Amino acid sequence: MTRPRSRRTRTRFAPSPTGPLHIGGLRTALINYILARRDGGDFILRIEDTDQSRCSVDAFDGIIEGLKWAGLKPDEGPSFGGKFGPYIQSERLGIYHKYADHLLQTGRAYRCFCSRERLEILKNEQRRRGETVRYDNRCRHVSHKELHSNFSQDLPYVIRFKLIPGDTVFYDAVYGDISFPNVDSEGDPVIIKSDGLPVYHLANVIDDHLMEISHVIRGSEWITSVPKHLQIYSAFDWEPPIFAHLPLMLSSSGRKFSKRDKEQASVALVENLRREGHLPSALLTWLAATGGLFEFAPSNGDGNSNEGEFTGLWRPENRIEELLSSFDFHSLTRHHARVDPELLQLCGRAHFDRLINEASSEQSTTHSAITEYLRDYLNKFHQTDGDCDDLKELLNDERYFIQMLMRLKGRINRISDLTSVSSEISFIWHPPNPESIRSSLSPFDTIGQSLFTVASELESLEKPSEDEIKAIFRSSGKLSGLPKAKFLKKLRVCLTGSEHGMPVHELILLLTPKEAAKRIRSAVKAKGKEKQSTRKE
């Protein structure tokens, strides 16, 4: 099979704005973006909105916003400009009619006046006889007299493309040579509907040619359309692009993703992933692993991802720009790929740690990338949320905030881990309610004074070392008469509200000795009031 000749790499992401941007769509956009950037070419966004009944402005805006947020900024497209516009199909109707007229004039298309009633009867008869449902090409043979009569009666019509019978063999960059027998088994397809709007098959081919697209990269559900498209290219005497069809993305349970499945919505929709605070760079790295875009990338989705597994080109801390030179279509798997939610968490943690390290080593007076991500997230999703006021205030002291994040390395998967009241580190911004932890501070007579001693010692220290804090624990713990581990649990409860979590000395350094002492005193005072109340009774 002859492959298309080499030309400048121009790829396109061509979604229909019929719903929220899906991770399957984002993955398609990512692969188009990667190829264009690897080859120094162009990445184009084109909006295919000819099915007006299903399109919405909100979905259109969501696509633009989602690509910008993910860092996949197109070189051309709506809102981005370019010399091949317009990039919205509903604004290109005159172009499609011009080329449809050319096909009519050259005998490769014809007007079909068959009514819906006739087509329905035809289908029912074919089903009754056990035949393949197909258009019988009746209007191919309409006489000039009948044609003029139909025009004079102003009968509605569609335009159909004449398929040439025979087998089709073409090369796909993912699947290799593919053969399709009996291209015309479904009958001649409609290319212009009765309302004058083009169908996907015509508009897609015309736009890809006029926009000089070199590679058509899309989901594998479109692979059966290639024979029709190749015949349309041939009818115009145009060179077709290179085709690359991507296997489907499946949920971790092996089901096909659906925009309407609420159970899958948290991981299936880009906006939900953004709302949950996933870093865009981590999301792209995760998508790059799904389906084996890069050699040695984990793609089995078996839920056993851990950092020790990754020894090849792909690693969870990689950024997409670092992987460009390694991209090869031959690395793509041909079977449907299951997503691995645990791998997303691992990528998130790796990208957070990397951003924290970079912010810690920066000497610049400008804001670090990680604080910019956090500010943008808070402005979009927590602008009026009082629960995040302490975090917003802390961002004003960026140097201290970065020091705090350094102590949280390995614990943050997404931004919402810093903002959610249900996060395991929410105690930083939300001190435990002293009233709710009183029962954990028994026996109070034994430990009350020891806890006060810890608070007093901490208040006297400005920048204590870990050894100094541990020395305080040893001396105060002996006063309590409790085993060391049990005493530290009591301290942890005062600081976080839980007996389990980070080492206590790390908690104190994270919160600052002053804040830690404040929490300890508050908890002890609440317990003391309880004791006094009990005695009075």
Image (cartoon, grey):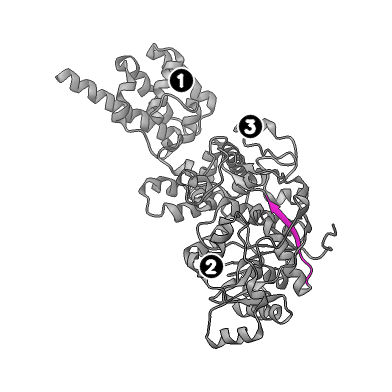
Q: Is residue 339 above or below residue 17?
A: above
Please, what is the three-letter code of the amino acid marked with disc 3? Answer: Asn
Q: Which residues are magenta?
A: 238-246
Q: Nearer the viewer, residue 107 or 494?
A: 107
Does residue 244 belong to the magenta stretch? yes
Q: Quadrant of residue 149?
A: bottom right
Q: CA distance from mark 3 to mark 2?
A: 44 Å
* Label annotation for residue 473: 1
Which residue type does callout 2 highlight?
Answer: Asp
For the C terminus, which image quadrant? top left
Label 1 sits on what residue type? Phe
Of discs 1 and 2, which sits in the foreground?
2
**Earlier residue among tags 3 and 2:** 2
The first of marks 1 and 3 along the sequence is 3
Marks 1/2: CA–CA distance: 69 Å
Instruction: Identify the residue at image location x=44%, y=20%.
Output: 488
Mark 1, Cα crowd under 10 Å, few <14 / some 14-19 / many 20+, is many
Q: Is residue 76 visible?
A: no
Judging by the rendered image, the residue that carries numbered circle 3 is 306
Label 2: which residue?
A: 51
For the N terminus, the image quarter is bottom right
Coordinates of residue 200 in the picture (x, y in percent): 62, 66
Marks 1, 3: nearer the viewer: 3
Q: Is residue 532 visible?
A: yes
Left or right of 75, for residue 394: left
Q: Is residue 226 above or below residue 299?
A: below
Q: Nearer the viewer, residue 434 or 418?
A: 418
First reached walking from the N terminus: tag 1 or tag 2: 2
Q: Position of residue 128 (x, y in %)?
A: 56, 56
